[in-house]
Amino acid sequence: MTQMSKEYATALFQLAAENHTESQILEALKTVSGVLKENPDYVDFLSSPGISKNERLDSVKAAFEGRIPEYVLSFVQLLCERSRVRAFDDCLNEYEQLYNASKQISEAYVTSAVELTDDEKKKLKLKLEKMSGKSLILKCAVDKSVLGGVIVKMDGKIMDGSLKHRLEEVKEVIGE
């Protein structure tokens, strides 16, 4: 993330906080992100110096007016105006981090050798929430090299309960 993305997202978050619309703004940003991801040619259009600024701004207005709050529409237009629309997802990520911090929500990145069942995810989430004292968003990935168990990355900490890690520890103990 760039400093510019942080500054833009922080300004938008402060505006949303003043108006108690943090979650609505987050959902609107996710809506815009979805549209931009589904239409990479649209991002090229909005970024093109060969297209007049007014044409790009009018296009954003036509695409999103009435679908998203005015603040978010103005935010997207500002990014277009300053030729920074490609930084939109960085701004969204930074906004989401600010939102999560303000609501005492952490993200836990869980890596396992096989896909966890919904029940396993639920139990793991509850256990991690109890440990951290925060609400959690669980983001799961599969990596067969883990062999078994799970690796959890949360709040700058890594909890490695993988079979691979345990085997490496045994290997160190026996001196190989």
Image: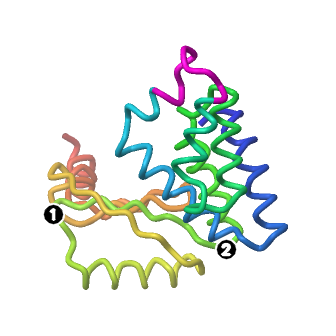
In front here: 29 or 125?
A: 29
Q: Position of residue 127 (x, y in %)?
A: 42, 83
Check if residue 128 falls in the magenta segment.
Answer: no
* Kind of element beneath mark 2: loop
Quadrant of image for the N terminus: top right
Q: Nearer the viewer, mark 2 or mark 1?
A: 2
In the picture, the disc for residue 103 is: 2
> Who comes first in sequence, dot 2 or dot 1?
2
Boundaries of the magenta span = 45-54
Q: Position of residue 160 (x, y in %)?
A: 35, 59
| Callout 2 amino acid | Lys
- Residue 42 placement, left or right of 86: left
Residue to which mark 1 is pinned: 114
Per the model, the C-alpha gap separating discs 2 and 1 is 31 Å
Q: Which mark is residue 154?
A: none
The answer to whether 161 appears left or right of 21 in the picture is: left
Relative to 86, does residue 95 appear above or below in the rendering? below
